[in-house]
Image (cartoon, helix red, strand yellow):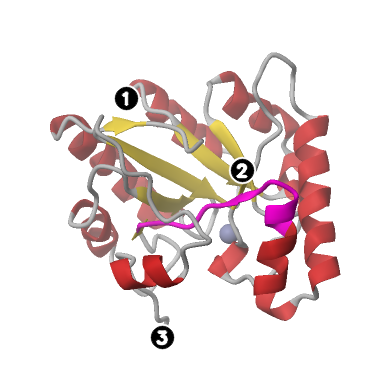
Amino acid sequence: MSFYWVKTHSILKKIFSKYVWDLPNEQNKVYLTFDDGPTPEITSWVLDLLKKHNAKATFFCIGKNIEQQPELFQRIIQEQHAIGNHTNDHANGWATTKDLYIKSVVACANSISKHIISNTNLPTSLFRPPYGKIKTAQINALKKQGYKIIMWDVLSADFDLSITKEKCLENVISNIQSGSIIIFHDSVKAFPNLKYTLPKVLNFIDKNNLQCATVS
Ligand SMILES: [Zn+2]
């Protein structure tokens, strides 16, 4: 059984104030984020749907996946979504030394730079630790390099195959509010839940006059 909070508690946000958990604003902006891509077919399905809703999002990409899917990666940029670093190989910070962890982040940053076509405001300073697991020394090293550590306010738990797709949807729509950072995965594993949930979340966002914006 997995243990996680669907809605990040305000006390936790205060204790871990080195992280960005949400982005309060007065324009009803919400921030959809997609981790672990780019993934063939799934990322393009997400991009098509976002386009239909005129919604912008942030993709926390894995370096190795960028190398395997450079065209898909470029499509994300061309459609004016934001890119974040999610390490080169989905490193677990708690099980990795600081040096190896930073190496993995740098390798991902190099892939991002290598595959970016000019006239964008990238490379990115956004970083999301895989599994949300990162040690203080790693955080400090990344902050020194100018990275913002982006966590989340609402966890769809689309990766959790023990929940129903209806529960995944409920996780999002009962917790989303202006300023929320919502986490999804454009991965094979999460797709059964994502496929059901994302179209309904985007309809919910439209109906409630929320605006999907990129994390910056
Ligand atoms: Zn991940």
**Residue 14 picture location, percent across and down:** 38, 67
Pick the residue in front: 208 or 162: 208
Could you tell which of marks 1 and 2 lies nearer the N-terminus? 1
Q: Position of residue 105 (x, y in %)?
A: 76, 54
Residue placed under numbered mark 2 in the picture: 84
**170 or 139: nearer the viewer:** 139
Q: Which residue is mark 3?
A: 1
Choose top left, top right, bottom left or bottom right for residue 130: bottom right
| Residue contact between numbered discs 3 and 2, judged by CB atoms under 8 Å | no
Disc 1 and disc 3: Cα gap in Å? 35 Å
Three-letter residue code for mark 2: Gly
Determine the residue located farthest toward the left in the rendered image.
207
Q: What residue type is disc 3 on?
A: Met
Q: Which residue is mark 1?
A: 53
Does the CB distance between marks 1 and 2 fall below 8 Å?
no
Q: Which residues are magenta?
A: 142-153
The image position of residue 38, as x and y in percent, is 63, 42
- Which of 84 and 64 lies nearest the eye of the viewer? 84
Q: Disc 1 residue type?
A: His
Q: Which comes before the other along the chain, label 3 or label 2?
A: 3
Residue 125 placement, left or right of 43: right
> What residue appears at the point 79 percent right and 71 percent down from the top-left corner?
98
Q: Is residue 162 left or right of residue 216?
A: left
Residue 75 quadrant: top right
Residue 202 visible in the displayed image: yes
Q: Quadrant of the N terminus?
A: bottom left
